[in-house]
Amino acid sequence: MNNSGWPPTQRVSLLLPPRFDAVARFSMSVRDILKMGDPRLLRVAQPVTQFDTDHLHLLITDLLDTMRAADGAGLAAPQIGVDLQLVIFGTDAPNPRYPDAPPVPRTVLINPVLTPLDDAMVEDWEGCLSVPGLRGKVPRFNHIRYTGHDQYGDCIDRTVEGFHARVVQHECDHLMGMLYPMRVRDFTQFGFTEVLFPHLA
Ligand SMILES: [Zn+2]
């Protein structure tokens, strides 16, 4: 998900001496984020078959650095062009884009399986780092169970609701080639962040 409308990282970097900023950026492995229209975002991702490998750990480091640099709330491997069923999300702290939402634990989720626990759907605003500058209201299941593995192959099995459930559904949609505008039902509730939420732009 996208939190780029509120860029504290950039604001902080502006206050830093140029040399410090350059060094900080050089030490990170920030990857380019694919934008909607790129066919690689429409693929159904492949399952991860080997855990706790150098390749996997490096990929996760890249995803975390890229998510942080973009001030995102989550990121899926296909968004940096990697065709694997792997998403990261959560910050362990309140998200400034959703100040009233409970913090979502920092999570690496691989080969996820999502199960809605009832029919209740909730509509709320979403953004996406692959759809920059826009926001839309998206219906999501309110209660879900999700299972999968972390990068070490350990099992994850959680029952969640609300914002946490929304973030997981948004990120896992990327693994099926689905971007949130494809789920928008009411296009009067879709537009530019700078118009809809000027305080976030
Ligand atoms: Zn997204």
Image (cartoon, helix red, strand yellow):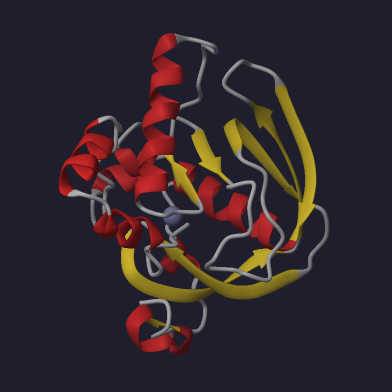
Q: Quadrant of residue 101?
A: bottom right
- Residue 36 visible in this rendered orientation of the protein: no
Q: Is residue 1 visible?
A: yes
Q: Residue at x 54, y 11 (%)?
A: 52
Q: How many marks?
A: 0
User: Residue 112: image x %, image y %?
Assistant: 62, 35
> Which is more toward the observer, 164 or 104?
104
Q: Quadrant of ligand 1?
A: bottom left
Q: Relative to 181, is 167 on the left or the right?
A: right
Give me the residue at 47% from left, 42% from top: 175
Above or below, 157 relative to 71:
above
Write down the quadrant of residue 32 in the picture. top left
Residue 114 position in % (x across, y down):
68, 44
Residue 97 x %, y %: 52, 68
Taking depth in this image into account, of 87 and 181 the one nearest to the observer is 87
Left or right placement of residue 89 versus residue 163 in this view: left
Position of 28 with respect to 190 (left or right) is: left
Q: Is residue 101 above or below residue 170?
A: below
> Which quarter of the rendering shows the C terminus?
bottom left
Picture residue at 62% right of the left edge, 25% below the top: 150
Q: Residue at x 23, y 41 (%)?
A: 20
Where residue 148 appears, x then y in whole percent?
67, 30
